[in-house]
Structure formats: C-alpha cells, structure tokens
Image: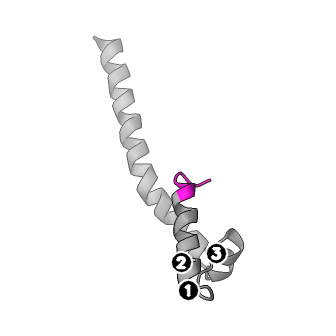
Amino acid sequence: MIIFQRKFDRSIDYLKEKNPDEVKPLSDELLGQKLEKNDARAMVISAMITILPVALIVLVALSLLGYWFVVR
C-alpha cells in the first residue's frame, strides 16, 4: 500500500511509454532476488540502531515524568 499510488502509477505509465523495454518496478519477488546474503541482517541491525535510541529516550522521559508525579 503506497500513499501516493496514483502518482506512482502515472509515473510508471509515463516511463513505460518512454522506454517500454526498460521499466520494471521492483516487486517483493524481484527485491528478494536482489538481496545478498547478509542484507536482511544488516537491515535489522540498522533498524535497531535507528529505533532503539528513540524508544529508550521516550521510555526514560515517561519514567522521569512518572517519578516526578509520584515524588512530588
């Protein structure tokens, strides 16, 4: 589910008219063929590096806020 599906379809149709032999949007099957051996592991590690610090900051902020309400 793409947010701008109509724009995406319109751009793909334009590219198909311009170069009918070259345009193939990546589907899940084609993307799976293009992944190398450790790409999935690298994507999981990079997601953890991106998401975990933000989640920890939010958790600490909520904990401090709760502690402030209890102690005060």
Local packing at callout 2 (Cα closer than 10 Å; few below 14, some 14-19, many 20+) is: some
Q: Are marks 1 and 3 in contact (CB under 8 Å)?
A: no
Q: Can you tell which of label 2 and label 3 is closer to the viewer?
A: 2
Sequence-wise, the earlier of marks 2 and 3 is 2
Q: Nearer the viewer, residue 38 or 23?
A: 23
Residue 5: say if magenta: yes
Give the quarter of the image for residue 29.
Answer: bottom right
Q: Give the amino acid at mark 2.
A: Leu
What segment carries the magenta color? 1-6
Disc 2, SS:
helix
Cα separation, mark 2 vs mark 3, equals 20 Å
Instruction: Please give the label number shown on residue 52.
Output: none
Residue behind mark 2: 15
Q: Give the amino acid at mark 1.
A: Asn
Disc 1, SS:
loop
x, y percent for residue 72? 27, 11
Residue behind mark 3: 31
